[in-house]
Amino acid sequence: MKLFKTVDKIFARFGNIRAMERTHVDSFTEGLIAEIKGDKIAESDFGQLYTTYQNLSGYDFLNVSLLSGTNIKTYKGCYLIFELPNNTTITLPSDTKEIESDFSNVSNRYLTKITFIVNKSEQEIISKGNFNKVFLNFKKKSLPMDKV
């Protein structure tokens, strides 16, 4: 294995793009991962979900940071679905339609930041933890997570 890393370093010095990508250490994304702000509200084998709230010009936003092994790249947005104890759901569409994950080759994880518009009642349910499961749906995939 050490031989391959040495060969990659040599090819990178000669300008080989693929070798440069393999030898690059991503300290920027790793720094973002280490400094995730907010409360962890859900986790599973698929990832961990952190949330913070923000109020801009009278609108309440739910800022979500998803740390997972799944690369999310979509131009159609996503949905955050909260499953409540009384078998009802709250569905929040993403504020922006273009969503792209940042990859860290140090820890081999993706960090995805998504914003959702919420009202006061939804914010209260989420912050108090009055839900059983959370699903992040994008494209034709769904990432289920249990409440922490």
Image (cartoon, grey):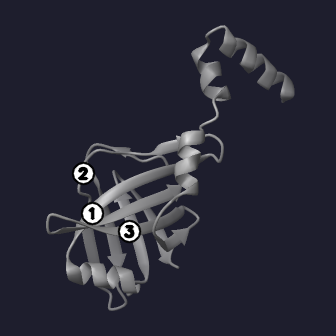
Q: Nearer the viewer, mark 1 or mark 3?
A: 3
Q: Is residue 142 left or right of residue 117?
A: right
Mark 3 highlights which residue?
52
Kindly check if marks 1 and 3 are in contact, taking CB atoms under 8 A apart as contact: no
Kindly check if marks 1 and 2 are in contact, taking CB atoms under 8 A apart as contact: no
Q: Nearer the viewer, mark 2 or mark 3?
A: 3
Q: Earlier in the sequence, mark 1 or mark 3?
A: 3
Mark 2 highlights which residue?
96
Question: Looking at the picture, does residue 38 appear above or below residue 71?
Answer: below
Image coordinates for residue 119, horizontal then vertical, percent: 20, 76
- What is the CA distance from the residue labelled 2 to the residue labelled 3? 17 Å
**Residue that appears at 35% across and 56% down:** 114
Q: Amino acid at mark 1?
A: Phe
Instruction: Return the residue nearer the eye: 15 or 86.
Output: 15
Image coordinates for residue 146, horizontal then vertical, percent: 50, 76
Image coordinates for residue 50, horizontal then vertical, percent: 46, 67
Total marks placed:
3
Instruction: Return the residue nearer the eye: 15 or 87.
Output: 15
Instruction: Return the residue nearer the eye: 79 or 123.
Output: 123
**Residue that appears at 58% across and 47% down:** 30
Q: Earlier in the sequence, mark 1 or mark 2?
A: 2
Q: Amino acid at mark 3?
A: Thr
Query: Quick check: can you spot residue 57?
Result: yes
The outermost residue toward the left is 58
Mark 1 highlights which residue?
116
> SS class of the residue under badge 2?
loop
Image-quadrant location for residue 1: top right
**Residue that appears at 50% across and 60% down:** 36
- What is the CA distance from the residue labelled 1 to the residue labelled 2? 8 Å
Q: Residues within 10 Å of mark 1 (few under 14, many from 20)?
A: some
Kindly check if marks 2 and 3 are in contact, taking CB atoms under 8 A apart as contact: no
Question: Looking at the picture, does residue 2 appear above or below residue 73?
Answer: above
